Image: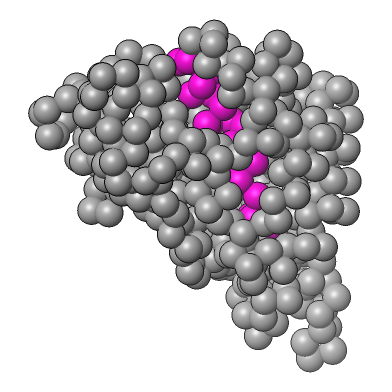
Amino acid sequence: MIPRSLFTPEHEDFRRTFRRFVDEEMVPHHERWEEQQCVDRAIWNRAGELGFLCVTMDEAYGGAGADRLYSVAMIEEMARAGVTGSGFMLHSDIVANYINNFANEQQKLQWLPRMATGELVGAIAMTEPGTGSDLQAIRTTAIEDGDHYILNGSKTFITNGYLSDLVVVVVRTGNSGEGSKDLSLLLVKANSPGFTKGKPLKKIGMKAQDTCELFFENVRVPKENLLGKAGSGFIALMQELAWERLIIAITSIATGEAALQHTIEYTQNRKVFGKPVASYQNTRFKLADIKAQLVIGRVYVDRCLELLLNKQLGADDSAIAKLWCSELVDTVIDECLQLHGGNGYMLEYPIARAYIDSRAQRIYGGTNEIMKELIARTL
């Protein structure tokens, strides 16, 4: 593999520490989490206790003031281990970022320290039944009523929704009924009267990650919980979605690399007609092709990370990364599963879990069809 020059010894020390946490405190419970369709609430508190939540937030808000490469190390380690249940990255690198980037000082001090300890689990509610990737079609409304907004509507496919304590809700604060000009972001506490949660949704993969519907019926939200200015929501969403899409690309490449390693080990030990599967030319050539594609993907993703750190990452760059890498990982895993033969279809093997878990990456963060549209606009 081409050496990676992005990470310092401090990053790698952090990676090793987080890897131990994943292997010792998450992997042993993951199958049970899949059965209950969400992780244990206690793992959030444990992650906060160890300093694994909101690491990029300033120390004044409970974080470590670290750069995003620390987040990347965590993303890659969870992908390596096939731990898809925790919504740590959405909580720390997406929800907390909205608050950090668009909230006033009072709001930051009110919410971020408790997110860093795991006292509050964060979620973001964009998608609605019937809207999908089309954020401009959002219909959830927040109507002014004195010092409050009255919130009505519903959201679906919300990661961390079932365990959430605080939700960034994308709402319409104007009367246009469509378009982007009156979209706003509201911070809504999960214990607010009129705010209810559906049961975790039954999915074909990523079963340990709690995903549910949220319902709002005349929920009174203080105006002080508005993030930024009324009507500025769409701009904020577009700004943060680039990082969210790059997270998907990072996860895809790391998942593909793990799948390759599992398959190399399996084919070296599995014998067919008296010889290891890895000794056949077909196997060697397929593995060589997979490695070549993953190396190319890794180089592009790392280049995007460099641009991100220098605040130069474009929306089209992240869309390309999300599109190409999420498509690649599904191709890689399909080839790797085939090389496992019948065992590849058994959930006791990591490749089978990866097969059903990775498919969603072509959908969330904006479908890959939307990514193509975004890229096409730059031509």
Q: In which quarter of the image is the N terminus?
A: top right
Image: 239 above or below 43: above
User: Which of 321/41 is in front?
Assistant: 41
Range of magenta residues: 82-103
Considering every residue shown, the one lying at the far left of the view is 176
User: Is 220 one of the magenta-colored residues?
Assistant: no
User: Is 90 one of the magenta-colored residues?
Assistant: yes
Q: Position of residue 241 (x, y in %)?
A: 43, 31
Q: In which quarter of the image is the C terminus?
A: top left
Q: Position of residue 84 (x, y in %)?
A: 64, 55
101 sits to left or right of 132 = right
Q: Where, by quadrant of the figure, is residue 77 drawn?
A: top right
Q: Where is residue 153 in the image (x, y as percent from the top left)?
A: 27, 45
Q: Position of residue 352 (x, y in %)?
A: 64, 72
Considering every residue shown, the one lying at the far bottom of the view is 273
User: Which of 35/307 is in front?
Assistant: 35
